[in-house]
Image (cartoon, coloured by chain):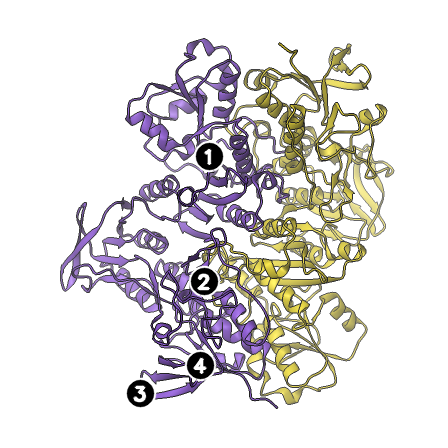
Chain colours: A purple, B yellow
Amino acid sequence: MPEPLKTVIIGGVAAGPKTASKVIRLMADAEVTIVEKGTLLSYAGCGLPYYVSGVVKEQKELLSTPVGVVRDPVFFRKVKNVHVMNQTEALEIDRAAKRIRVQALTKGNESWLDYDKLVLATGGTPVVPPIPNVALGGIFKLHGVHDAEGIREVLSQGKAQDVVIVGGGLIGVETTEALVHAGCRVTIVEMLPQLLNILDWEMARLVEKHMESHGVKVLTDCKVLSFQGDGHVNAVVTTQGTIPADMVVLAVGIRPNVKLAKDAGLEIGSTGAIKVNSHMRTSDPDIYAVGDCVESIDLITGQPCFVPLGSTANKHGRVAAINICGGEDTFPGVLGSTVCKVFDYCVARTGLTETAARKLGYEVAMAMVPGPDRAHYMPNAASLLLKLVVDSKSRRLLGAQAVGPGTGDKRIDVAAMAILAGMTVDQLAHVDLCYAPPYAPAMDNIITAANVARNKLDGTMIGVPPQEVHQMMEANEDFILLDLRSPAEYEEVQLPGSTLIPLGTLRERLGELPKDKEIVAFCQVSLRGYEGALILKAAQFEKVRVMDGGIAMWPYEKVIRKRVVPTPHRHQRARQNLDPKGSDSHPAR
Amino acid sequence: MPEPLKTVIIGGVAAGPKTASKVIRLMADAEVTIVEKGTLLSYAGCGLPYYVSGVVKEQKELLSTPVGVVRDPVFFRKVKNVHVMNQTEALEIDRAAKRIRVQALTKGNESWLDYDKLVLATGGTPVVPPIPNVALGGIFKLHGVHDAEGIREVLSQGKAQDVVIVGGGLIGVETTEALVHAGCRVTIVEMLPQLLNILDWEMARLVEKHMESHGVKVLTDCKVLSFQGDGHVNAVVTTQGTIPADMVVLAVGIRPNVKLAKDAGLEIGSTGAIKVNSHMRTSDPDIYAVGDCVESIDLITGQPCFVPLGSTANKHGRVAAINICGGEDTFPGVLGSTVCKVFDYCVARTGLTETAARKLGYEVAMAMVPGPDRAHYMPNAASLLLKLVVDSKSRRLLGAQAVGPGTGDKRIDVAAMAILAGMTVDQLAHVDLCYAPPYAPAMDNIITAANVARNKLDGTMIGVPPQEVHQMMEANEDFILLDLRSPAEYEEVQLPGSTLIPLGTLRERLGELPKDKEIVAFCQVSLRGYEGALILKAAQFEKVRVMDGGIAMWPYEKVIRKRVVPTPHRHQRARQNLDPKGSDSHPAR
């Protein structure tokens, strides 16, 4: 009988335990050992913002299986037949002898552990920026359970009134909500010109506006210069002034833990993470690497990228285990599909942003399409602001972004599938998605968006992005900003300097418009804008364009004339803000 | 200047107005006329169950654009430049002279209308089964707004205590909820062995059980013999006895309206609906047909099918309009993607059921995978019972079904995309979907399901469907039904005749199990069942299978020992019923 396969896994949070479980399932007699530096195993790191906010009540829940069993070393041994050495640090890989040197952190003694196959699941470490006084009390990261405990303790003592979050990426944004719910005044400080740079600027602006409506102060293009305080932080000095702060959360990014791999001479990729092939194998055929410490291949560009996500980590683990056990499985790569909750907005994206696509040299068509996420007459209809990025040449979908209270995650998952399948927007416009009024409009949001993209590609709609309209405004250019909504809608909210001609009266009032002047037509969602532009075009108006996304996706200030009821019923809000397919929705089965 | 293109459209509910709008957009000077028999135009037929229930409060909402403009003939003329002749019936198509004969229903006078292009959007008619006394008062269909008004009136008068719904298809099921909410005692009578025959039997059973938990009586394999009453219905005589009824709703299906087309000699398909090519053109090159009166091509089988849905109707309209205007667009066909709301369950499906796939000669592998629809520790996690149908030879996904309070529509839309893309379950297991705890588990439900299917295809998991286990029970076969859950879970609910050995103790207690006897292992979701089976297999147990779907998807009665709190918090309910990936969930980013 052959010796059992000795598999040693360094790292016990996500990808490590997943690999261990799958190895044992495929090879019941394998000897599997997990070496983990911390005390805790297999915890749900992405649940931490919800533990901070109290949505998740007990730490235990993040550590438990869905039936409530805590995943401790006894659980791993009895249920999984996996040996766990926690509070144990791996110090060195001896590739020649196929062994690793470990140290028991409580006792201090070192020993060697032999392996046939080694798996590095060493994860990532939050970046601590080299800002003066970053070590002051009250300055937290949010990475492990202990960080979350620290923040919770401060919050429970009511000691944090003013909180500054440094970094407006995913973790910063998710943490903001938790802190606002705890009653803190929160300021986000972001170095870049926008939050969430996984989105295009105007989509990120819609998120910022939503955060601001919840009392969050968002400072973009803003750099932290230093922290002030005597032992404990009391202010953050930035390029936009000094902000009082009882607590600071650093959320500037994650760096892959590659020291062990690097010291052992394993290849590190251009992103700084461990390089693996599609089998999750490192440059040493007996060493695999999985989870947040490795880089992935971007499925659109073919280039390496560093996108540490729990969903990817779990897939890595399964692929590595299958290959370790002599099977064959490959991990193809990622699209950067991401979702996050920002108060009552769902923010989701996949593939390339417009900015990224243009940088890569694509000729891009884009569609910005707001609409309710289900039949507009259903009380739970909620607004969904969707953007598609399309390669003009191949007509293929390159990317998609969704912002709003509607179910954007669903549409972005569909978009991810379309990108993976290499679908054109023409194909996407005809896919057979589920329809019933409580779940979707008769023309699903993504199908409408694909059709808008087709209209633009086919030249029947000429769009102008809101940024360009804003520039034209700022430059005092001589053009007509033609609002085709109803007088009642116009009374409520309008764009500065716009001219109102309701669509139903446009044919009679053509004489009011000069034929030689540039016209930008719009409405709530730019469908009436589109129809108006077609009427003008047929009447020999020469320079007519349609503003992408309409008022619903205008990323600047609007002129609010009549305030709507402060906290309108969600249904009402969806209707007032949105006009999904304008005057043209026939959602009958 | 050429004459404007005369387009006449017969039918003004969904596909007709959509075609009209798109024709005008593409060709501003076209003359477009809609001929509609009824008074109302462009109403949301699929919203009717929600109008009956009062979720949609006013009839007007079903007739309005999202900004609240009623789509009446004035709207169509002023906004759309479309001429509408409502209360006008098309009586005859004179193909040779390219004209139709119409009758104004109020005045009775007839006239001829010339066309260059004719579009048939004649819709469907609810089937009225030839049952004795079907014309009694209190017997309704639910097709048009007037039907809904009639039902609402009876409900508002409190005259309907006992309601019988004849037909357990989509409309019957959607209407049931409305009537139960109105306080009626509802019985559904269905001729077939199950409700919703767009699902496999065991999935439909899970829906039936849910309806029963809301007090609905479901009679399957039951035929209506006659209605009783004196002027007004008071009972329904069925093969399973006589049921008192103050009101009856007939929901036995829709028949396409093809008389005009048939009389004009246009080709009718094998399904009885109008045959069109992918351009939505009938056998006459100047006549198009769209919406519920035409048949579609099933994208998996390539065979014609009749699936009247509003989502499809809208796509038809756009394709027909583009081709009418000299462009080129094709409608590829359908997968039968469908969703419906059944109380707090979302029921969705796409592609082939297992039953249909086997009938078509496929060698089928299937996966039944229950789990929470987001990270299990999130309070809004809800259970999702998923089934995949896979072609064993090509490993391609053929179909998917979802039942439960979780967001099944999202996963079925993803499945539809996977089928359209021709993806194997191996590819599906690696797709990059959005993950964050409020929206999905780290391994999305559909990815876990794809992996379960792969385990079965690869022979590492041998499944046995619940129906077969039930047969073995009924036949008193000598086998061990091995429950691998915890004693606490076992105390709460169990399967009849099962033996409890918690997974964590299995390795120590192997001696209690006979090696030669057949063993069926299971747990809440059959992940611990699967792990247990692997342990047994490694210990040389020969005949071990895993019950598909676990207790969570058991379609028969369970032994309830300890009742849970009557109306548990949704969070608790999701956890108690589900154990998504059993002991093996590592949802960290």
| Residue A360, position as x, y percentages in the image | 42, 45
Mark 4 and mark 3 on one chain? yes
Q: Numbered disc 4: what chain? A: A
Give the mark nearer the N terminus: 3 vs 2.
Answer: 3
Left or right for A572, reference B344? left
User: In the image, which disc is placed on residue A107?
Assistant: 3
- The residue identified by callout 1 is A572
| Residue A443, position as x, y percentages in the image | 59, 37
Q: Amino acid at mark 1?
A: Gln
Count neighbours of disc 3 (C-alpha within 10 A) and say few if under 14, some if 14 to 19, many if 20 or more: few
User: In the image, which disc is placed on residue A84?
Assistant: 4
- Cα separation between marks 4 and 3: 16 Å
- The residue identified by callout 2 is A310
Give the mark nearer the N terminus: 1 vs 3.
Answer: 3
Mark 4 and mark 1 on one chain? yes
Residue at x 56%, y 27% (from the top left corner): A584
Give the mark nearer the N terminus: 4 vs 3.
Answer: 4
Q: Numbered disc 2: what chain? A: A
Give the mark nearer the N terminus: 4 vs 1.
Answer: 4
- Cα separation between marks 1 and 3: 63 Å
Count neighbours of disc 1 (C-alpha within 10 A) and say few if under 14, some if 14 to 19, many if 20 or more: some
Q: Amino acid at mark 2?
A: Gly
Relative to B452, say whether A416 is above or below.
above
The foreground one among A452 and A233 is A452
Give the mark nearer the N terminus: 2 vs 1.
Answer: 2
Q: Quadrant of the C terminus of chain A?
A: top right
